[in-house]
């Protein structure tokens, strides 16, 4: 690895000052599960590595029925899985966090880091998009909220400008009759990057099984994570039966633009998008129905 | 280039200090600075788990943590697993069940297993396999490893009940 | 049952003591090659080619040398240029030029990752940064990546000096050799057969996947002697090959075996060892070199990908009649694929009267292949054992029974070599048939059961052993066989058995090349067999000497002294029997210390057979395969330490499953390896495998004092075919390409169902 300087600010303000001062020469480090590998490979060569794990605001999980979820960008995935509110109210996002790598990786990797790394295959990103999550970004010029589906611009690139820091996610309170799910396809049972990932959330009209809200998002089948707007349009107002789910699956497949690579062929991925979208919507719907009863 | 940093940490129950460059990983600090070579390098990408140590109660890959991040933390490595006299139950069961062949993955597997049993004293076989998914073993096919961890869990809970 | 030392059952052999190196390994105390540190030690790193095929026009190391902390940079110019000819190194014939050029490239680079230069510096980070400062000017050439492309007329030539017998002395070629085995008349036989199945198979290049990367610490002393500490399967190979590369006398190099973190054949040759000595010589310091994972995958010795066309025929009654096989294996950048072994193992478990096998060793721009657990055999068995499954189905015969009917027995002809002596192939099939696994019903959609068998010759070769009797009556056993899987415990058990000692009173020691006589590699399933034989004989030598000493004490002749159940005794009044412990304090006055010694060049090897049964469940919508259950049965002759024998069977099965499902090398069109990490080189994790059941069969090897048959390798041979057969029985598709990864399997499933994706989509869930 090239020589680096290490800083560990305790507040968002200090972190932003450091990042703004050094610009492209600085990179935040959170879990390090992507960055340290990149530093070793010489893919990124920042002079300053800014450790943001000591910033309390970025490490908290705060949920309330009024405000919904404030999920710190630096919360390690394992803490998401261990949090009762996360498991109850956002099971899809939670299972996405619990799928990343091994337990060792989950002890370190964060949802914020996953998003900022800008990989189209990031598991938690479709789950966030399905929930309608927004990213709160703080920079030298102030704050802004970015819908997660707009965050990644190209493989490895995001909307973050020099000096900006992703601080936390705002996720709306789930309606009483809604839930989410995340499914991914990998060739082994763990430790693989998603070949295809699908996140979905649905809201059902009480007693009717009619969909009032639906969001579907995809991982690993385009240059960025994909929000399948057309699927929302096709599902809202419809009964969530096999035909509707099938339609959504076809739209998801059509929205995907996968490539051939060593993890799968484009043809294969297109097929699996359909399969997983079907399964994921069915799972989200089943949870939504149960939530109607249990919450 | 940044000069070396002094890092204060609690390692295997002892307060210690060591000197390291910011670019050194915790694994390098353990092996090259502190001469604790029990944690092994297998891949440097977090895919094999041979470098697994426990930090603040969590198993993680020490190759993906900077040594400077150890400041103020509590670290357990395989060198600290056994009590002063004898072996930890996990170590004992690994020997009885012949759960190691070349032994290179063993320290990492032991630490992941300890972290598992610390959090979940009664794991099912599926729980164990999931917890060890990040520890690659190429020699054993994992069979005798899983059996040893199950046996260790049983043994520890028998002891806990007796105590 | 094998003859025991005293006519009764064994006392120690066959039990499961805790291994002697166990505590060191579970506490992190055991020293592997990368764990060594010496005062003043420098750190080395290797610069590697970013191209698959190129001419090296120039190398400029000035800037690298100028980086503070860098102490030396070496290239092929710092090594003697070795001629393009074969020479015996130990027992192995090696091509000197190829050996040397694989250590550091000379004039050409032949694969992505080919070593070009090495640096020694005061920290590994500085050494790494120094590599970036070495300037190499390349003339890039088109790469040749597959055997098909390499064999086409007009293909780019890798080695201008390579010739094969058939094409003659004037034709440049990428085909290093062509071997043929023939028996009977296949053409006639096929005409008369009731069932003929012919398929073409492809298998991908795979790596042994040991968790420990290669390492070497070299210390060159001013007196011209060098010591190499390294993780290796063969210290004597390290010594002889390093001596050749460095142009040093073999006797001036001592190779010290560190503990080794896996080898499976991949550590039976050299990569870093001579470089560590060379850099130490140049700097006057010890130099440690280690590889990172990317280097291990790019630039060590994976095993061959292959193309195999296999045609088998049988009668309606299930009797195999003929086999015609054409197989081409990737050798990598230099000749030496295991295609010969593949040819000799491919239908070896069966009695087939008509046989024609053509085998081709082909160079391609990939790393030079090295041995991987029964090298060449798994590729071959994938082809033959799936076709056997098809034939069995056509005949309506159970797959185990089909194999039993055709199975090789004592007296059956081998493909090459004398007829089999007593072997245990049929017994492994019967063990599978009688296993709880095979007897259980497999129920559920998309689930299937597959069986396959495999063969491996095993080797004998040379081993040395010494048994020292200490003054307290305990013993140490000194051997040269590196312990990669628990064999040192087995060696101690053999000595303990012969000497009548408790296993905890015998200490095994794996020694360096000066401290023990020549011992060939830990590989070829030979350690328990040949080194065990040497330890047995060395222990018997110690017993002979003990008898002489007792005779002296008792004023008897040595032939009047018996040794039974660990006791020396003789007829006569007042002659109390003595154990080794009783004799030990009396050694000094009866002649001095006792060291038993023996060397063997083991010729009468016991070949090994395995049969594996696998249950799978296939997700027909994604092509993903789950292994539900696996059982391996293997004839091991005599299981010295059954737990470690089971471990070998389980480990080989796991590797075979990885080979079957997801392991493969991905090269892009430029010949660059895309998956040089363990994220995308996908080996099975703990969550990918079920418990692996074992059924040990013991049919003793004739001629071996303990009946031992080599254990380590053959279990890797059946699984790829067993999984393929299980997939067929689950979803009705015959896979002919390895690995049977989800994209490939799904494609085959969709093709079978008419190829309409929407059809499958509608049916899928």
Image: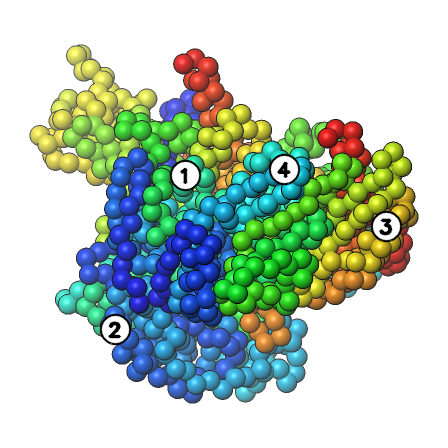
Query: Residue C144 vs residue A258: left or right?
Result: left
* Rendered image: mark on residue C131: none
Find numbered disc 1 in the image and state the secondary structure of the residue it sits on.
loop
User: Which residue is labeled 4 in the image?
Assistant: A64
Please name the residue shown 53% across and 70% down the image. Answer: C366
Q: Mark 2: give few (<14), some (14-19) or many (20+) Cα within 10 Å.
A: few
Give the label, 2 or 1, closer to the camera: 1
Foreground mark, 2 or 4, reads 4
* Badge 3 vs badge 4, beta-carbon distance below 8 Å: no
What residue does disc 3 label? A235
Badges 1 and 4: C-beta atoms under 8 Å apart?
Answer: no
Residue C126 x %, y %? 31, 68
| Mark 1 on the same chain as mark 4 | no
Q: What label does residue B56 carry, if any?
A: 1
The answer for which chain carries disc 2 is: C
Tag 2–tag 4 contact (CB < 8 Å)? no
């Amino acid at each position: 690895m090239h020589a680096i300087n290490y800083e560990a600010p305790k507040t968002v303000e200090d972190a932003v000052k450091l990042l703004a001062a050094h610009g492209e020469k600085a990179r935040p480090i959170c879990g390090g599960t992507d960055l340290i590998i990149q530093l070793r490979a010489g893919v990124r060569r920042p002079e300053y590595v800014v450790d943001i794990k000591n910033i309390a605001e970025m490490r908290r999980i705060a949920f309330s029925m009024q405000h919904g979820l404030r999920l710190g960008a630096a919360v390690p995935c394992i803490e998401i899985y261990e949090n009762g509110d996360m498991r109850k109210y956002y099971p899809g996002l939670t299972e996405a966090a619990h799928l990343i790598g091994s337990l060792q990786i989950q002890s370190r990797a964060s949802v914020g880091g996953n998003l900022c790394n800008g990989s189209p295959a990031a598991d938690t990103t479709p789950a966030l998009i399905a929930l309608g999550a927004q990213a709160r970004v703080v920079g030298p010029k102030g704050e802004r909220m970015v819908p997660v589906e707009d965050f990644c611009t190209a493989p490895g690139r995001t909307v973050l400008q020099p000096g900006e820091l992703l601080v936390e996610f705002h996720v709306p309170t789930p309606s009483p009759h809604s839930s989410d799910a995340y499914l991914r396809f990998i060739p082994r049972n763990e430790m693989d990057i998603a070949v295809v990932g699908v996140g979905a959330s649905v809201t059902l009209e009480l007693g009717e099984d009619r969909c009032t809200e639906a969001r579907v998002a995809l991982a690993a089948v385009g240059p960025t994570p994909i929000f399948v707007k057309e699927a929302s349009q096709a599902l809202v107002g419809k009964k969530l039966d096999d035909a509707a789910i099938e339609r959504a699956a076809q739209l998801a497949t059509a929205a995907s633009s996968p490539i051939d690579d060593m993890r799968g062929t484009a043809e294969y991925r297109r097929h699996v998008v359909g399969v997983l979208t079907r399964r994921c919507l069915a799972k989200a719907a089943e949870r939504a129905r149960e939530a109607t009863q249990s919450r | 280039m940044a000069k070396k940093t002094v890092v204060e940490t609690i390692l295997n129950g002892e307060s210690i200090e060591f000197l390291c460059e910011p670019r050194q990983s915790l694994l390098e600090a353990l092996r090259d600075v502190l001469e604790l070579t029990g944690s092994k390098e297998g891949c440097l990408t977090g895919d094999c788990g041979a470098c697994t140590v426990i930090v603040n109660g969590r198993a993680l890959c020490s190759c993906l943590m900077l040594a400077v991040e150890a400041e103020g933390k509590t670290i357990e490595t395989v060198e600290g697993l056994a009590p002063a006299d004898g072996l930890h139950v996990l170590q004992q069961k690994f020997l009885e069940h012949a759960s190691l062949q070349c032994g290179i993955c063993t320290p990492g597997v032991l630490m992941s297993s300890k972290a598992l049993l610390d959090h979940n004293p009664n794991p099912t076989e599926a729980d164990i396999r999931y917890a060890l998914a990040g520890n690659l073993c190429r020699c054993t096919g994992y069979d005798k490893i899983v059996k040893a961890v199950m046996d260790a869990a049983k043994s520890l809970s028998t002891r806990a009940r007796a105590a | 049952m094998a003859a025991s030392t005293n006519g009764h059952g064994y006392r120690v052999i066959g039990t499961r003591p805790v291994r002697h190196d166990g505590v060191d390994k579970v506490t992190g105390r055991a020293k592997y090659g990368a764990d060594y540190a010496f005062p003043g030690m420098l750190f080395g790193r290797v610069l590697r080619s970013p191209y698959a095929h190129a001419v090296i026009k120039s190398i400029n190391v000035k800037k690298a040398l100028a980086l503070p902390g860098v102490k030396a940079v070496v290239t092929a110019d710092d090594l003697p240029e070795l001629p393009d000819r074969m020479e015996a190194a130990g027992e192995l014939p090696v091509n000197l030029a190829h050996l040397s050029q694989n250590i550091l490239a000379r004039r050409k680079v032949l694969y992505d990752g080919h070593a070009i230069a090495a640096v020694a510096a005061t920290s590994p980070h500085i050494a790494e940064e120094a590599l970036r400062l070495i300037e190499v000017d390349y003339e890039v050439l088109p790469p040749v990546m597959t055997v098909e492309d390499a064999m086409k007329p007009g293909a780019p030539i890798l080695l201008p000096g390579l010739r094969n017998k058939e094409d003659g002395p004037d034709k440049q070629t990428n085909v290093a050799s062509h071997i043929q085995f023939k028996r009977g008349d296949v053409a006639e036989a096929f005409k008369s057969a009731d069932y003929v199945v012919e398929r073409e198979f492809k298998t991908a290049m795979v790596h042994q996947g040991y968790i420990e990367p290669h390492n070497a610490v070299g210390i060159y002393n001013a007196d011209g002697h060098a010591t190499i500490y390294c993780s290796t399967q063969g210290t004597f190979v390290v010594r002889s090959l390093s001596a050749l590369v460095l142009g040093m006398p073999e006797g001036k190099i001592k190779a010290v075996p560190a503990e080794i973190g896996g080898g499976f054949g991949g550590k039976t040759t050299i990569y870093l060892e001579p470089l560590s000595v060379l850099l130490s010589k140049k700097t006057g310091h010890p130099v440690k070199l280690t590889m990172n994972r990317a280097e291990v995958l790019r630039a060590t010795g994976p095993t061959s990908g292959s193309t195999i066309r296999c045609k088998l025929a049988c009668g309606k009654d299930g009797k195999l009649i003929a086999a015609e096989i054409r197989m081409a294996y990737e050798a990598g950048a230099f000749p030496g694929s295991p295609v010969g072994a593949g040819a000799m193992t491919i239908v070896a478990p069966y009695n087939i009267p008509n046989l024609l096998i053509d085998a081709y060793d082909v160079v391609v721009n990939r790393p030079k292949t090295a041995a991987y657990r029964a090298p060449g055999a798994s590729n071959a068995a994938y082809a033959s054992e799936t076709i056997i499954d098809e034939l069995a189905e056509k005949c309506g015969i159970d797959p185990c029974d089909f194999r039993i009917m055709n199975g090789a027995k004592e007296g059956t002809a081998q493909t090459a070599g004398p007829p089999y002596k007593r072997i245990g192939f049929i017994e492994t099939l019967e063990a599978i048939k009688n296993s709880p696994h095979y007897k259980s019903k497999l129920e559920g959609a998309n689930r299937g059961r597959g069986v396959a068998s495999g063969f491996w010759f095993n080797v004998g070769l040379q081993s040395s052993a010494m048994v020292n009797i200490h003054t307290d009556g305990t013993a140490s056993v000194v051997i040269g066989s590196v312990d990669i899987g628990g064999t040192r415990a087995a060696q101690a058990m053999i000595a303990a058995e012969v000497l009548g000692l408790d296993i905890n009173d015998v200490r095994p020691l794996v020694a360096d090349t000066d401290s023990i006589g020549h011992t060939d590699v830990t590989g070829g399933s030979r350690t328990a067999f040949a080194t065990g034989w040497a330890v047995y004989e060395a222990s018997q030598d110690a017993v002979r000497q003990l008898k002489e000493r007792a005779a002296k004490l008792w004023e008897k002749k040595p032939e009047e002294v018996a040794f039974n159940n660990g006791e020396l005794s003789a007829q006569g009044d007042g002659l109390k029997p003595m154990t080794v412990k009783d004799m030990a304090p009396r050694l000094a006055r009866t002649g001095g210390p006792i060291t038993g010694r023996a060397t063997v060049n083991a010729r009468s090897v016991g070949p090994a057979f395995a049969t594996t049964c696998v249950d799978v469940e296939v997700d027909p919508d994604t092509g993903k395969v789950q292994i539900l259950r696996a059982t391996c049965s293997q004839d091991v002759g005599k299981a010295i330490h059954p737990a470690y024998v089971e471990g070998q069977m389980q480990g080989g099965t796991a590797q075979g499953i990885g080979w079957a499902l997801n392991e493969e090398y991905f090269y892009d069109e430029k010949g660059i390896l895309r998956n040089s990490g363990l994220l995308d080189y996908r080996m099975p994790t703990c969550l990918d495998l079920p418990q692996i059941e074992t059924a040990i069969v013991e049919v003793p090897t004739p001629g071996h004092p303990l009946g031992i048959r080599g254990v380590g390798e053959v279990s890797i041979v059946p699984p790829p075919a067993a999984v393929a057969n299980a997939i067929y029985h689950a979803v009705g598709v015959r896979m002919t390409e390895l690995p049977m990864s989800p994209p490939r399997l799904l494609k085959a499933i969709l093709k079978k169902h008419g190829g309409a994706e929407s059809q499958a989509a509608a049916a899928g869930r």
